[in-house]
Amino acid sequence: MRLDILTLFPEMFTGPFDHSIIKRARNKGIVDISLLNIRDFSTNKHKTVDDYAYGGGSGMVMMVEPIALAIDHLKAERTYDEVIFLTPDGELFSQGTANYLSTRENLIILCGHYKGIDERIREKYITREISIGDYVLSGGELAAMILCDSIIRIIPGVLNDETSALSDSFQNNLLSPPVYTRPAEFKGMKVPDVLLSGNEKEIQKWREEMAYKRTMEKRPGLQLD
Ligand code: 6GU
C-alpha cells in the first residue's frame, strides 16, 4: 500500500510514523508513506497557501491552486483508489471504514487547516471526507495519523499472531475481554481461575461471555457499519 499525505506540517508525522507497528510495516515494505508539503506547490514568491475568505468572516481558507497542483503531481505518477479529505464535517470514521481502506492500493490523504479548504478542491478531487469524531482539532494531521495507524495495523503481515487484529475490540461488534499477565496475584487481587486452568474451551467461553458483558455495560449501542 502507498499512502501520500498532503500537509502543511510534514514534521508532525515523524514521531508516530517512526515507531512501533507503523515503523515495522514500513521496514517490512508493506506500506510506503510519503509526506508532501503543500507549501512546496505554492506558485507565488511568498509561498502563500491560504487567503481571506470571499464574503468575509474570520479565518483563512486554504487556496485551491497549491492543493490542486500537489494532487495533479501525484496523479501523474499513479492512479489512486481514493482521495481522502480529513475534516470535522466528514463521515464518522469507523472500524468498517478502516477495514475497507486497508484493502486499497494507493491513497491520497489531504489534511486541512485554518478555516477549511476552497470548496472547489472538494468538488473536483475529493472522493471521501472523513471525520474522526465530533470535536474540533486544529488541523487534519492528528486525524490523518489515527486513520493511517488504524489502516496499516490490519494489513496482513503487519501484526503477528500474538497481536492479531482479528481479536480487537470492534472487529466483531464486541469490546475485548479483560486480559491479565503475571503475577497471578497482586495486592490480594487474583487472576480469574479459569485463565489459569489450561482448559482452552472454558477459557474461550469465558472470554466470549466477558466480551459480551463488557459491551453491554460500556457500549450497549455499539454498531458497526
Ligand atoms: Cl478529520 N479534522 C479536524 N480539524 N477536526 C476534526 C477531525 C478532522 N475529526 C474530528 N475533528
Image (cartoon, grey):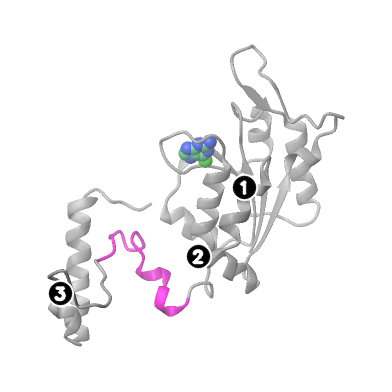
Taking 198 as reference, is 85 left or right?
Answer: right
Does residue 89 show up? no
Of circles 2 and 1, which is in front?
Answer: 1
Tell me whether circle 2 and circle 1 mark residues in contact (CB < 8 Å). no
Residue 121: image quadrant is top right
Quarter holding the N terminus is bottom right
Of circles 3 and 2, which is in front?
Answer: 3
User: Mark 3 or mark 2: which comes first in sequence?
Assistant: 2
Dot 1: what SS? helix
Whether the magenta-drawn stretch holds residue 164 is answered as: yes
Q: Look at 31% across and 51% down and name the residue there.
A: 223
Q: Position of residue 117 (x, y in %)?
A: 64, 30
Magenta-highlighted residues:
160-177
Taking 108 as reference, is 219 left or right?
Answer: left
Tell me whether circle 1 and circle 3 mark residues in contact (CB < 8 Å). no
Q: CA distance from mark 1 to mark 3?
A: 43 Å
Does residue 161 show up? yes
Q: Which residue is mark 1?
A: 12
- Ligand 1 lies under 8 Å from the Cβ of mark 1: no
Q: Does residue 183 lie above or below 116 as drawn?
A: below
Q: Look at 63% across and 41% down and name the residue there.
A: 126
Q: Residues within 10 Å of mark 3 (few under 14, many from 20)?
A: few
Which mark identifies residue 153?
2
Looking at the rendered structure, the kind of residue marked 1 is Met
Taking 31 as reference, is 149 left or right?
Answer: left
Which mark identifies residue 192?
3
Taking 46 as reference, is 150 left or right?
Answer: left
Q: Position of residue 21 (x, y in %)?
A: 52, 67
Looking at the rendered structure, the kind of residue marked 3 is Pro
Which mark identifies residue 72?
none
Residue 168: image quadrant is bottom left
